[in-house]
Image (tube, rainbow, N blue to C red):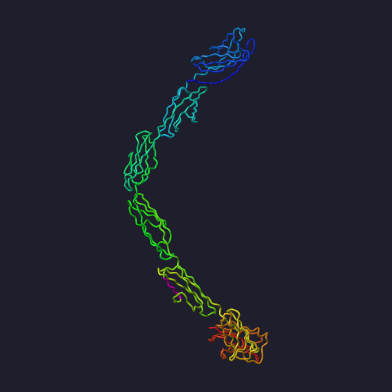
Amino acid sequence: MKCLFTLLLSFTTLGFLQSQTIALNPDNGNPGSAFTVTITGTATAFSVASTTTARISNGIESYDITGSATSATRFSGSLDLPPDATSGLYNATIWQQGTAGTFWSCADCFTINAACLIDATPSVLPVTCAGESTGSINLEVLGATGSETYTWSSGQTTKDISGIPAGNYTVTITEGTCTVEVSAEVTEPVPLVLSTESHQESTAGAGDGSITLLVSGGTMPYAYSWSNGETTQDIGNLSHGVYQVTVTDFNGCQALSAEIQIMGGACALEVAVNSTPIFCNGDNSGNIRLNVTGAVGDVTVQWSNGAPDTTFISGLLAGDYQYTVTDGAACEVTGEVTLTSPDPVGIILTTTHVACGGDSTGTAKAEITGAQGVYSISWSTGDLGDSISNLGAGSYMVYALDELGCLTNDSFMITENAPVTILIDTVLSVEGIIRVTVQGGTEPFTYQWSNDTSVVSTNEDLTGATPGLYRLSVTDGLGCQAVSDTIRIEETSARFDQQLIEQIRTYPNPVKYQLTIRLPQALIGSRLSLINVLGQTIWEGKATDQLTTIANQQWASGWHSLRIRQDDRQISIPVLVQE
């Protein structure tokens, strides 16, 4: 055990003849060691031809440096320090004969180190399992005083270290100027190595597969744990599947094998498919049946539509269906079945609408597409055949049934134009005027006014008429016709002022339950009478106020005439009574 210290000093000596600077290298040493000391000085410090002596001394003990000057600036020699050399600081002196006894010295320029008595012995605990960090090193240290420090090559600074992996470790123990290095190796066992050889099933479902396991490394004996529960080194009588083994050695170290696949032998599994297509477009009358043969053990079936594990599924729409059949030997058959459906039965309708409101001149004709074989057509009216006529405005249905029983239907509307309607606006008996408004129908309109014997006008409004009964016939552009009720122009000898006439109001008109008459102030006291189409007075009274109300007393429907008479003047206003 050697303690090493390095210290380079320079110093100045005082010679009798001149001042010189010398330096020793090394400038320290340990007891019991021998080494070369080189003393250097300034230029021309030494004479090579002269005898030169060098030594170190602490004033009590001295030790010679045996050697000679090798140049004018260098002295080289060997220094042997005995084991019992006293530690401390020493002065160095170099003396040379032949140059008038010249010598040089330096004070406290060499150190004999104190004896290093520390001794350390490592105790190593190896790693339990390869790759782990379970090793430790404990030091038994002698000769230390308790102030020493520890520096490990792995970075720890404690005396003992643990939880370390396998490897070489060095610790430096330092106490004062004493330094000790100790090395130790932490070992680990050879790792467990597993290798397997597998033998597959001879045929699907035979159950005669096997696995042979080879183990090396670790520490014997070994224990085995297979994924199928077996605990022997090798296993047999294996069916198709995946197997794995865990091996544990004497120290509890474990190794897990890769997954080992035992393949089944040749599969005899076969699947035949029977399917029923869709009868009618859009319905769910399809079904599929799988006939499975050659299976080993139980059979499972998976369907792409999520159907349960079964070989028969029904209630299917048209489309593609995939299946996967698997038996107990892991044999598998996949396939796809396409269920088709006929084209949809379609109905193309052609209709004509009612020209004149209230008529029944509409028609409909149906053309059938996509039907299978012979088909029949029926209508919501009860008619049969591909067309119907004499339809009034309204909603209708048509039905088509082909020979497969596929039924389809469609709805359609027959519309009509608004009927021609004649509204009597004003009857002015004094002037012989009847004003009307025509609604509905299709323009242009033609007009024909007639009395009991002949046509008297073809204008919209009748003017210049003499007292009597008149009727208006209106025909629209499509030939649709409306005829008014009989309108009476009364005989009168005088006429009301036009301003009074414009203030007369009757409402509602048409009337169902009650008629209200509003007269201007000047006509209060007038005689009021309601005359039907036959000229019969069905109500009469006197206007005692501006408002007069008449209740419907089961009046016949149709046009009536409200007669307002004051003195020798009178006016008739048409009123339409509705049931």
Magenta span = 374-380
In the image, 187 versus 528, the foreground residue is 187
Principal secondary structure, stretch drawn in magenta: strand
From this view, report whether residue 301 is shown above or below residue 217: below
> Does residue 541 appear in this view?
no
From this view, report whether residue 463 is shown above or below residue 315: below
> Does residue 216 appear in this view?
yes
Say if the magenta span includes residue 82.
Answer: no
Q: Residue at x 53, y 21 (%)?
A: 5
In the image, 305 versus 95, the foreground residue is 305
Q: How many marks?
A: 0
Residue 90 on image: x %, y %: 56, 15
- Residue farthest to the front, as pictured: 373
From this view, report whether residue 72 is shown above or below residue 477: above
Residue 544 on image: x %, y %: 62, 87
In the image, 268 versus 548, the foreground residue is 268
Q: Residue at x 51, y 14 (%)?
A: 80
Q: Residue at x 57, y 16 (%)?
A: 24
User: In the shown orientation, is residue 379 left or right of residue 509?
Assistant: left
Residue 265 on image: x %, y %: 34, 47
Residue 354 on image: x %, y %: 53, 78
